[in-house]
Image (cartoon, grey):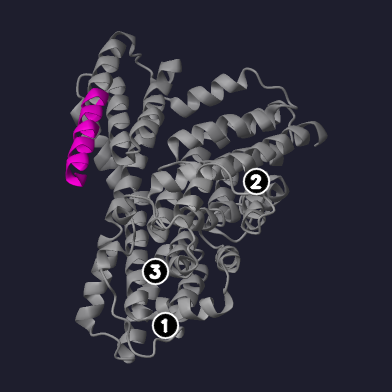
């Protein structure tokens, strides 16, 4: 009976996918006569791939296929005579980009580091150590939040280390993986945008210099000026303990996840094993007398090396893998061959998250080609007043970010438009820039296929659709409060 239901579901999904493809072809053919020479002149038509993407995701809960089909639609609009060539060329360009190469190295080796820590018994020992201190459900979640606050240097580092190490601890207290993923995700990007020594601060500071607001060499100083106004980062991070402690009650889809576990259901939602960073390793044999130092030392080296090499996480992971090789072989925990096998398995476990991020970058690339973000910002600019500019920028770009999921990519596009506009309207520039930064964090935090969502899902072992869907109400709550504060600030500052 169960197999029959599975077969029927598979057939239904296949029919939906076929219908989606036919819809894309039909729409794109209708657009043939409206395709302009200049991509920025697509106007409202530039929103079609994004609308299709969001609708398809909510109907099918399939993100990989949604990104692929929406990208195809975009390339049909851009290059109707050579869609396949345009798709292939852009995919190759994305794969050859420095950002993707960096992601493959950093995220792949982070998968190796996590697998090696588990093999060495470090994760088990750390779980036992935390379990003695986190004796209740609430305390295990508060420990997760606290560790997330400490590992503030980078959102990838935060999500992957805290998520993967705290999952076994919260599992013992019957915490739904969706709740764990929400706590981990809320101390990743939201904290990085309010900490002046994070990778986000370095990147944004440089953009502020490039776009003429900050003098050369003073980007971080000007980034610090935005910190009081980065409302979403502060609020998203601070409401987490209020939810854990019950001050803010759990509501929305997260409440259903809680009920599922209370009723004896699985801790992780269906389909989570596909993205779980630990799923490919099977049962890990714990060595005798596992030591917590085999967890703590690699993490300390990872953070310290990242900071030492000018907040370069790629250098951090390379140094850490080398350090772990010496540390674990010296203790005779594994042979060199075992070390290589486990490291390779860790990279394999990151294949699906990396595929999703490549497709997200590809979708962002075609959106740039059809002028999606440009259209949204330029349309909103026509209705802005000095007082309403901060809140308008935040809302418009938050929606844009939710759809595109490229926080740093959006900053590159939006800041050259927003900074001159703020100067022209005599708006507090720090406030206007903060609205852009907050919108980027919201997108990273809430989008179904953003890098933060995907990596948090992989680390916590939670299907990324369910992770994004269950945390969305809390993100929207934080965004609503932020919008009110941006509205007030627009009139006060």
Report the residue at 46% width, 84% height from top.
Answer: 293
Using a 10 Å C-alpha cutoff, classify the residue at mark 1 as few (fewer than 14 neighbours), some (14 to 19) or many (20 or more): many
Using a 10 Å C-alpha cutoff, classify the residue at mark 2 as few (fewer than 14 neighbours), some (14 to 19) or many (20 or more): some
Query: Disc 2 to disc 1, how far (Cα)?
Result: 43 Å
Nearest to N terminus: mark 1 or mark 3: 1
In the visual, does 483 lie left or right of 170?
A: right
Query: Picture quarter containing residue 15?
Result: top left
Report the residue at 28% width, 31% height from top.
Answer: 69
Q: Is residue 210 visible?
A: no
Of residue 199 and residue 236, the one placed in the foreground of this image is 236
Q: Name above or below for residue 146 compared with residue 38.
A: below
Nearest to N terminus: mark 3 or mark 2: 2
**Residue segment shown in magenta:** 1-20
Q: Nearer the viewer, mark 2 or mark 1?
A: 1
Of residue 16 and residue 485, the one placed in the foreground of this image is 16
Report the residue at 42% width, 65% height from top.
Answer: 164
**Percent position of residue 68, x then y:** 28, 35
Determine the secondary structure under disc 1: helix
Q: Name above or below for residue 390 compared with residue 467.
A: above
Main SS type for the magenta part? helix
Q: Nearer the viewer, mark 1 or mark 3?
A: 1
Determine the secondary structure under disc 2: loop
Determine the secondary structure under disc 3: helix
In the visual, does 199 lie left or right of 318?
A: right
Give the residue pinned by disc 1: 294
Residue 7 forms part of the magenta stretch: yes
Quadrant including the N terminus = top left
The residue most toward the top is 33
Q: Nearer the viewer, mark 3 or mark 2?
A: 3
Query: Disc 3 to disc 2, how far (Cα)?
Result: 31 Å
Q: Which mark is residue 214?
A: 2
Give the residue pinned by disc 3: 317
């Amino acid at each position: 009976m169960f197999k029959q239901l599975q077969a029927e579901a598979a057939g239904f999904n296949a029919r939906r996918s076929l219908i989606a493809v036919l819809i894309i072809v039909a729409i794109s053919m209708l657009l043939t006569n409206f395709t302009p020479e200049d991509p920025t002149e697509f106007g409202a038509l530039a929103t079609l791939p994004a609308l299709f993407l969001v609708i398809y995701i909510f109907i099918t809960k399939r993100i990989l296929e949604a990104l692929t089909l929406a990208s195809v639609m975009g390339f049909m609009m851009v290059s109707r005579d050579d869609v396949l060539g345009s798709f292939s060329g852009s995919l190759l360009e994305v794969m050859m980009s420095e950002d993707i190469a960096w992601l493959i190295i950093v995220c792949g080796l982070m998968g190796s580091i996590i697998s090696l820590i588990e093999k060495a018994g470090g994760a088990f020992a750390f779980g036992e150590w935390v379990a003695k201190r986190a004796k209740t459900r609430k305390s295990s979640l508060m420990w997760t939040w606290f560790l997330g606050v400490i590992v503030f240097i980078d959102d990838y580092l935060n999500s992957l280390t805290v998520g993967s190490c705290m999952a076994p601890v919260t599992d013992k207290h019957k915490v739904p993986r969706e709740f764990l993923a929400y706590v981990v995700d809320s101390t990743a990007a939201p904290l990085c945008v309010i900490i002046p020594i994070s990778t986000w601060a370095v990147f944004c500071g440089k953009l502020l210099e490039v776009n003429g607001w900050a003098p050369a060499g003073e980007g971080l100083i000007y980034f610090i000026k935005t910190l009081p106004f980065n409302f979403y980062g502060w609020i998203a991070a601070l409401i987490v303990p209020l939810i854990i402690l019950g001050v803010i009650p759990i509501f929305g889809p997260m409440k259903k996840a809680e009920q599922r576990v209370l009723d004896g259901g699985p801790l992780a939602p269906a389909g989570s094993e596909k993205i779980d960073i630990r799923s490919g390793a099977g049962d890990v044999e714990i060595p005798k007398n596992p030591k917590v130092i085999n967890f703590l030392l690699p993490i300390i080296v990872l953070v310290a090396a990242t900071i030492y090499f000018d907040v370069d996480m790629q250098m951090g992971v390379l140094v850490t893998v080398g350090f772990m090789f010496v540390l674990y072989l010296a203790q005779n925990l594994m042979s060199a061959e075992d070390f290589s096998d486990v490291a390779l398995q860790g990279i394999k476990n990151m294949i699906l998250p990396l595929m999703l991020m490549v497709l997200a970058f590809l979708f962002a690339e075609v959106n740039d080609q059809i002028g999606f973000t440009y259209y949204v910002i330029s349309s909103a600019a026509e209705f802005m007043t000095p007082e309403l500019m901060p809140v308008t920028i935040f809302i418009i770009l938050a929606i844009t970010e939710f759809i595109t999921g490229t926080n740093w990519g959006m900053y590159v596009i939006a800041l050259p438009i927003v900074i001159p506009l703020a100067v022209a309207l005599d708006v507090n520039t720090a406030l206007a820039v903060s609205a852009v930064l907050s919108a980027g964090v919201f997108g990273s935090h809430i989008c179904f296929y953003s890098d933060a969502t995907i990596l948090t899902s992989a680390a916590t072992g939670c299907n990324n659709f369910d992770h994004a869907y269950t945390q969305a109400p809390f993100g929207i709550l934080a965004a609503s409060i932020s919008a009110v504060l941006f509205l007030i600030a627009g009139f006060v500052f």
